[in-house]
Image (spheres, rainbow, N blue to C red):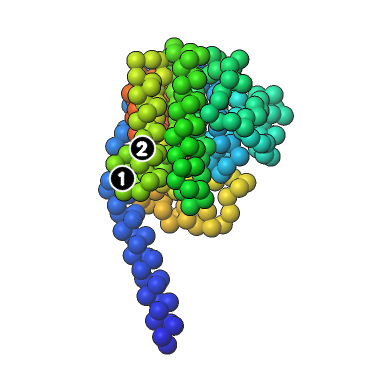
Amino acid sequence: MLLKKLALATLFAVVLALLVLNIWGYLTLGKLAPAQNPQRDTDANRIVMIFGATGSVGDGLLQAAMEDPDVERVYVVSRRTSPRIDAAVATGKAELRLQQDFTDYSGLADILPQVNTVLWGLGTSSLNVDDTTYSRIHVDFPVAFVSAWLAARTEAPMSFHYVTGMGTDANGDSHWAREKGRAELEVAAMAAGTGLRTFGYRSAFIRPASGRANPAHYLLQALLTPGKLVISSEDLGAAMFEISARTGELPNGSLIDNADSIAYAHAYAARQR
């Protein structure tokens, strides 16, 4: 009897937490509304570079890039390959550039002047590494890249899309939140006065792409959808491409929450129909 009561109490607590979380998301997320009749630059996503494509988020970003008709070339920068990367390279649309040191991009000097859009999905959990390593991955790596990219070109259209995550805050209580917030601010400051726009994606739950998602992912998606707290990695990539193409809509340094990403992904899908 005691175990049954404990189980019921636990279930009630979980249901209540999900209800509160969804209500919070529904009422607070979604500050940006895509313009109804925007001007789009069809060259804004012509040449794309992707970081973190072997991870669950970057895998979907790569899929989105491969399916986008405006993307002519995809450069995948990674330490290793993956089935998705191999399949992309086999089409002839993508090229894998192996990279071991993510603070030195001299090996990409031949292609950086061509790149219009960068999707940065590279990262790790703060539970997996110490604070110093976390800062190196989430601040030093992207800052070094943006510095190298701006040394190679500064003319628009250029956009840098960084997946930072919900809870990111330069003044936050946790180390991971502060460091990702610091990265958002640093890359935006570097881009100021150039043709580059940077965007921080403060996404909630990012469901892995089809083929990598399991039943638990889809269950979590169903539970979090009412509060706009979930987006698939492919749709996140679509939102990034839509924001890139709308070159006059969002300024450098814009922060995109999960509901914002959903709205821009819907705008992208409507354009493809």
In the image, what residue occupies the spot 32% across and 41% down? 169
Residue 69 image label: none
Rendered location of residue 42, percent (x, y): 48, 17
In the image, what residue occupies the spot 61% across and 39% down? 54
In the image, what residue occupies the spot 30% across and 54% down? 23
Callout 1: SS: loop
Q: Nearer the viewer, residue 195 or 209?
A: 195
Disc 2: which residue: 181
Residue at the farthest right position: 90
Question: How many numbered discs?
Answer: 2
Callout 2: SS: helix
Tell me if residue 230 comes above or below residue 1 in the rendering. Answer: above
Q: Amino acid at mark 1?
A: Gly
Alpha-carbon span between mark 1 and mark 2:
8 Å
Q: Looking at the image, do the residues carrying marks 1 and 2 touch, with CB atoms under 8 Å apart? A: yes
194 relative to 208 in the view: left or right: left
Disc 1: which residue: 172
Q: Amino acid at mark 2?
A: Gly
Residue at the farthest front position: 132
Rendered location of residue 103, percent (x, y): 53, 28
